[in-house]
Image: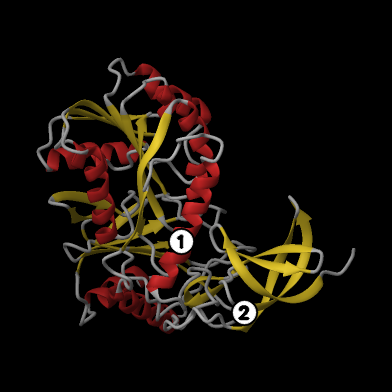
Amino acid sequence: MRKAKLVTGRVIELDFPNKGIVEAGDGICVVKNTIPGQTVSFFIKKKRGGKYLGSLQEIVEASPLETARPCPHFRVCGGCSYQTLPIAAEEEIKEKQVRRLIEAAARSFEGGLADNWFEGVISSPNEYNYRNKMEFSFGDAVKGGELNLGLHVSGHFNDVVTVDGCNIADSDFTEILKAVLELARREGATFRNKHTGEGYLRHLLVRKGQNTGQILVDLVTTSDEPEGFTEKLTSCILGLEGLRGKVVGILGTVNDSVADAIVDEGTRVLYGQDWFYDEILGLKFKITAFSFFQTNTTGAETLYSKVAEYVGEEHVRTLYDLYCGTGTITQLMSRCADRVYGVEIVGEAVEAAKENARLNSIENTVFLAGDVGKVLKELGTPPDMFIVDPPREGVHPKTLSELMGYGVKKFIYISCKISSLARDMEAILSAGYILKRACCVNMFPKTSGIETVAMFEKA
């Protein structure tokens, strides 16, 4: 096998989302986790689609754009890409990527983009400490090393680094992490070994209502509990002083599965309750340990306000909210429609949506569990308008074809992965729609993520 070649070059620009384009001899090379202006060394591994793929070895020289203070764990944990960029530079990069992909998708459709279609990037109200949910893992950084609690090391999934200085997570999470880790080390608790299956500690899930201050903690372990550990955990967390929020529930979830993911094989309440409340734009939501809720609450308020603006003040009789999760958008849109149907494949999320609608005394919503494509065929009332907020892979082609068949005057597409929206635009523009308005909401500062809200209208 030919040994990979080590090359040094300067990052010219970014391909989506954080793949640097570097000149490499007789072509260009794509190198992940880089920033324009950096000089990097990398191994050229293979060629695909006319481009070489490179594996980053070292940042030889920083980019002139890098002036912001980095997180102490930057480039060790795999969580963030843009820690060293000031927010203006980060959002300029993201805007260029979005515009380039959308404009390329519309190139074959004359008039597919309205004049002044792009309205820019809206910043998250909070640049730091905005995450209201974190899933920490127990492990070690080196084989046989000290117990750590944090995130996986970038490029080394078996290794865990303690992230007691993460600057995108809520600051209360750091205090809880440090206290739980100190307890676990003091008690000599072991983490589950992926190879032998032995050990006790697996994950620590922490969630917080940013607008209510309510905190829910869930320790995920195997069933092999050391005597008295959960009692000590409860006392440890409740004894913390200086938290800005209030702990309303502490849970213990058993997970003996092989998969290195949180699997609920039984959860018991160690203290308080197994849920907490948060609020978005005047509505209250009951959230459990595993239910979906946007990880940036104030960012979500910004996003949903833009969706409401795009929907407008015109009267809507029937509105579909597809891939609705726990029904946040469905309930917010109930203010501007006679009837709103929320469709979601995860049954637990649908039950949570129904409960939240009752909590908010909303009576004009209907929530349906099932695959969006199949549920659409069962719904007898066609929509006047619809909103889609699909998973990262976008809308299934058959489902998209079904939606285009409704011929609505306009609809809203919310995308967490702009390349999926760009792909889906071929079918949308082919159906006679134009992209009238679009903007981005920087829901995940310091990372490569960006949310795009697009409003399509019949030409």
User: Going from the N terminus, do you reach mark 2 or mark 1 first?
Assistant: 1
Counting the numbered discs, the total is 2
Q: Is residue 22 above or below residue 383?
A: below
**110 or 314: nearer the eye?**
110
Give amino acid for label 2.
Answer: Val
* Left-right relation of 79 to 310: right
Q: Toward the viewer: 232 or 441?
A: 441
Among all residues in the image, which is located at the extreme right? 1
Q: Position of residue 7 (x, y in %)?
A: 77, 75
Distance from disc 2 to disc 1, alpha carbons, whole Å, reads: 35 Å
Query: Looking at this view, is 433 or 81 the one in front?
Result: 433
Residue beneath disc 1: 94
Where in the figure is residue 391, as x and y percent of width and height? 45, 43
Snapshot quadrant of residue 252: bottom left
Is residue 143 positioned above or below 396 on the image? below
Q: Which residue is identified by label 2? A: 142
Expressed as whole percent of the image width and height from the top left, the position of residue 407 reads 36, 21
Say which residue appears at 47% left-offset and 53% top-offset.
Answer: 98
